[in-house]
Amino acid sequence: MSNQYKNIEPSPEETITLLTKALAREKLARQQLEMQIAKKNEVQFDSTKELLASYETAKVREIQLEFLSFLNREHIENKTIDELTKFFIENVLQLLGQHTSIVFQCKDGVISNLLTIKKDDVDWQQLELTESVQTLLNTFIPAESSTWIRTNLTSNVGEVIPFMQEPLLLALKIPQHQKVNKIILINIEHYCYSDDFKSTLAIAANQFTGIVQKTSTERMLSTNYSQLKKTLKLLKKTQQQLIHNEKMVSLGQLAAGVAHEINNPLSYLSSNLETLQDYITQYESIIDKNVTDDANNSPDFDELNFLKEDSKDLLSACLNGVKRVADIVTNLKQFSKKAGSEFSPTNLIEVIDDSLAIVTNKIKYKYDVNINHGSDNLIVEGNFGQLQQVFVNLFINAIDAMPEKGVLSIQTSRSDNEAIITVKDNGIGMKNDTITRIFEPFYTTKDDSKGTGLGLSVSYAIITKHNATITVNSSVGKGTTFTLTFPC
Amino acid sequence: MKGSVFNGFESYVEEQYGLHIWQQLIEASESECNGIYLASDTYNDQDMFSLVSILSDKVSKPASEIQKEFGIFFFKTLFSLASHHIAHIDTLFSFLRAVDDVIHVEVKKSDTSAYTPAFFYDQPSENELVMRYVSKRGMCYFAEGLIIGAAKHFETPAQISQSKCVHCGDKYCLINIKI
């Protein structure tokens, strides 16, 4: 300091005041400078802010994905719902850094499959389901599904379930099927997590609910499928039985006629055989006479000729009679066989002829039969016995529709790829109401002794099985025509 | 820790206890920077703990209490620094929920790799907020002070307590705020 200013040298008090002011100015200058730096930093930060935010978001997503990846196909495949649930809870516990969880199944307030895991437990343990535990757990079941519900626990929880020491509870309800819910409870110290973290937990809950429901549906479908398979098997068996029963009923109806049919040849067989026995006696007598009598006494050649000719006729008639009985028995045997399912090339004309032979006794006295085969070749892929059953049924229906007398007309024809058969009667015919119901099982217009109501429904099933169709045309008082069309 | 926090602490000490006490703290702390703290720069965390500890001894007040008082004092500075980020916020809880972002910006703007504390939230009811404070610095009392400062600013009477604290052996701090 130069001497000329010495006289204005400040007092110590003034110096302190000046220095204080100088310090304040310096401080202010520094603050202003730092504010300028801060502004510049902020501008710079703003330019990279979005980039940093994107980086942060990407990092969060990566963590989310890493966590959610435990629910991928590889980890959940071939696991039961219980195994899946344990696996899910263990992962959530790990994420939350917690140790205690309870899981149970609940249906209409009834709790079952109660399991728990807690700190230092190696595996899940069963928890005794006392009345107080059941009452307490019921209060924790959330109303909403697939969402974590956070509840504050009161101190009495520890009295009922001693290992539930933490103050909060995360509860998740997962609906399975038929009112069954899986309930997951996680005892937590706090629920202070970032929004991203909570959203990851929510996604996991949602995803897991989907997995459980899918697995549950698959299990149910699989169970239903095996039940359906069993039912189908039973139905098939019942259907076969019904078809056979129907056949037996038809056979029963025919039995009397068949007995009569067999009795006819049997009676003339018996009569012819008795006559032949007489003839043999006569032959013996003539032969004996010729051996012992005078050589001039010649035999009665007229009588011998008669015996010879008549014996031939009688034997021929007997053989015919035997053949007739054999034919009837053969037809009946084929008819009474349980319908197999084997299909082979089958001539419909043979089926029709054999079916007519079975019902011939019912027809021959009162009815005329017109058969008009438009083609000799009506070979279809089919089952002889089943088709025979269809035609016998149609013929019997036609006869029953003509109580006094009538004409049964059978017409066959074929086009390039179809064989068509019509079976027509000129009987009483049917009303429209009846026509719409004739293929219904157990529907019949006949009295109990005659019909089971299964004939046409069984026929319909057989026709459908042959990929064929059956249609009906009928007018009251004029008659009915059934048209069967087979692919060939 | 950012220099702006040291600057804030300096202002707090000067206002509460006088310039001489601050100077004595600087002398006693033997910090490497000799008490020169630039707001935009970052300094050793230990410097702050030692300043608080020396002040605690000097004024016979628990360090936790000093941290809390400093938090209340520093709220105004923090709020003015971040005012343009939180202009739309008008309630205590919405401010507290934004604190994490505010601090994040303030710290990262001068050094993007700087360490930042983190707050996680849970709101069990409309008038209750729980904040989990996670920081290697363990300055939960300072955070508590900031919350008290915020409650005063928004004129919202609030009861603030800690149910868990790292200084009591817990893994983290839980700060409960009831309004």
Image (cartoon, coloured by chain):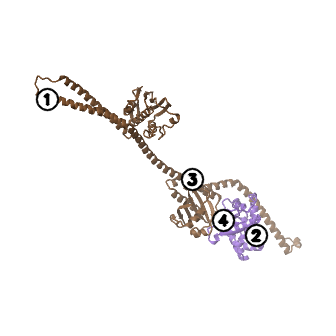
Residue on which disc 3 sits? A210
Task: Kindly report the distance in space between the C-alpha atoms of the residues bearing marks 2 and 1.
Answer: 164 Å
Q: Amino acid at mark 2?
A: Tyr
Q: Amino acid at mark 3?
A: Gly
Q: Amino acid at mark 4?
A: Tyr
Secondary-structure class at tag 3: helix
N-terminal-most mark, 4 or 2: 2
Q: Nearer the viewer, mark 4 or mark 3?
A: 3
Residue A346 lies, in percent from the top left, at 39, 33
- Tag shown at residue B133: 4
Q: Can residue B78 be seen? A: yes
Task: Kindly report the distance in space between the C-alpha atoms of the residues bearing marks 4 and 2.
Answer: 23 Å
Mark 4 surroundings within 10 Å by alpha-carbon count, few (fewer than 14), some (14 through 19), many (20 or more): many
Question: What shade has chain A been given?
Answer: brown
Residue B59 lies, in percent from the top left, at 73, 76
Task: Kindly report the distance in space between the C-alpha atoms of the residues bearing marks 4 and 1.
Answer: 141 Å
Residue A363 lies, in percent from the top left, at 39, 31
Q: Nearer the viewer, mark 4 or mark 2?
A: 4
- Tag shown at residue A288: 1
Q: For the residues tagged 2 and 1, is the chain the same?
A: no
Residue on which disc 2 sits? B12
Secondary-structure class at tag 2: helix
- Please give the chain letter of the residue carrying mark 1: A
Residue A81 or A380: which is nearer the viewer? A380
Q: Do the residues bearing badges 4 and 1 touch, measured as CB atoms within 8 Å?
A: no
Left or right: A404, with A58 as reference point? left
* The chain coloured purple in the image: B
Left or right: B164, with A257 as reference point? right
Q: Amino acid at mark 1?
A: Asp
Residue A171 or A343: which is nearer the viewer? A343
